[in-house]
Image: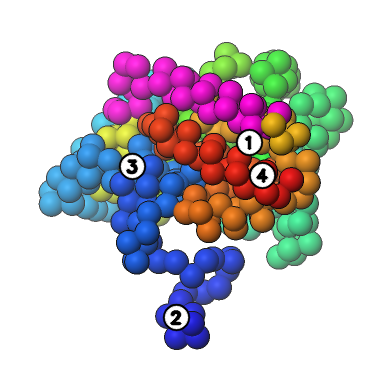
Amino acid sequence: MVDDLKKFHAIMDITRRPAITFVRGEGDWLFDACGNRYLDFIQGWAVNSLGHAPEVLVSAVSRQVAKLVNCSPAYFNESALALADQLVANSCFDRVFFCNSGAEANEGAIKLARKWGTRHRDGAYEIITFDHGFHGRTLATMSASGKPNWQELFEPKVPGFYKVPLNDLGAVQAARTPKTVAVMLEPIQGEAGVLPADDAFLRELRAYTRKENLLLIVDEIQTGMGRTGRLFAHEYADIEPDIMTLGKGMGGGVPLAALLCREEIACFEYGDQGGTFNGNSLMTAAGLAVLEEVMKPGFLDQVNTQGSYLRQELEKMATRHDSGPVRGRGLLLAMDLKKPVGAEVVEKALERHLLLNSPRLHTLRFMPALNVTRAAIDQMVDTLSAILAELL
Ligand SMILES: Cc1ncc(COP(=O)(O)O)c(C=O)c1O
């Protein structure tokens, strides 16, 4: 056992991990080094949008790796151009900047808003964000996040972020100063436990920010690319934000993220923004394969069908175990537990070879592959139900 633990030592210890080494994935399943298989309802934290090792991704990446990986961001490449065109064609945005992680995309969004404030709003730079929001782990994105236990961490934070309660336009109005340049939020707060911004609130916020000449930034890193059953979650509210960030499911598992904005907001000057790996051919080829799959007729309908089925089964289970409510949209769902046993549920699920996530003590979050099968949903529900019967 000690020898076993030693083999993990070279990896920096930044989170509690079980002593399991995964070696292979296939669809809804992960396989460890001993040949055990695990039903995966985490999927890399909502990242493997098409499941593990989907054929379209394998062939797109294999073809691209043999052809061109990185010609440097100083030059255009075929797959970045094609993916940017597809993103623009399927959204209300005109310009795309590719990067490698959600935090980097949000860092870029914050910089872009500040640049726009310098240019158009007399140096305004403050950004209103939301309690419990999560925007990443760089210093600026941690500063923008509203995670309560981050408040004292890595002080001093980047200044200029003011947090208000979600779904409260009055609080946004009260936090607004002449230096406010933008409001930034997730359409559904994922890490907070799948807490949705109401569609009506998003519409009010869009109207208010437009009237006051403030930018509206939506962080769709978790909700975007089909996760909620529409390509982007803000579409449910029928609004057009000024800036959007994408990541996670965008690359189907590989590190790919993006910052998108409308033409009149795209004010970076040469040297303001960049990065060695940004928009490389390999990752954007993966992103293109994922987007083409998600845009195929019927794909998003299927996300909604499976999402409704998962929701219905979770609701039945919640009733049986005096738990709930169930929240979320499409295949980003959460179920509250009446007791703070989230971590215990996750541990017991792992013992039964089911991978689950508990972002809060009282909450389980479900983020399977967007093409999850009904059989996988049934198996997850049966296993979880047995665990809840034991624990609650
Ligand atoms: C809404 C949201 N924004 C930003 C991030 C940060 O993304 P990354 O971990 O790729 O930096 C996450 C990650 O969970 C997220 O859910």
> Disc 4 residue type?
Leu
Q: Are marks 3 and 1 in contact (CB under 8 Å)?
A: no
Q: Do the residues labelled 4 and 1 touch (CB within 8 Å)?
A: no
Q: Give the spatial CA distance, label 2 vs label 1.
A: 34 Å
Helix, strand or loop for the magenta stretch, by majority: helix
Residue for badge 2: 4
Q: Residues within 10 Å of mark 3 (few under 14, many from 20)?
A: many
Residue visible at 31% across and 46% down in the picture: 26
When the figure is inspected, residue 123 is found, relative to residue 30, above or below; the finding is: above
- Image quarter where the C terminus lies is top right
Q: Do the residues labelled 3 and 4 touch (CB within 8 Å)?
A: no
Residue visible at 45% across and 46% down in the picture: 40
Measuring from the top left, give residue 32's x and y in whole percent. Answer: 37, 61
Residue for badge 1: 334
Q: Residues within 10 Å of mark 4 (few under 14, many from 20)?
A: some
> Disc 2 residue type?
Asp
Q: Which of marks 2 and 1 is nearer the N terminus?
A: 2
Callout 2 secondary element: helix
Q: Are marks 4 and 2 in contact (CB under 8 Å)?
A: no
Examine the rendering and report whether any part of residue 361 can be seen.
no
Q: Which of marks 4 and 1 is in front?
A: 4
Residue for badge 4: 388
Q: Which of marks 3 and 1 is nearer the N terminus?
A: 3
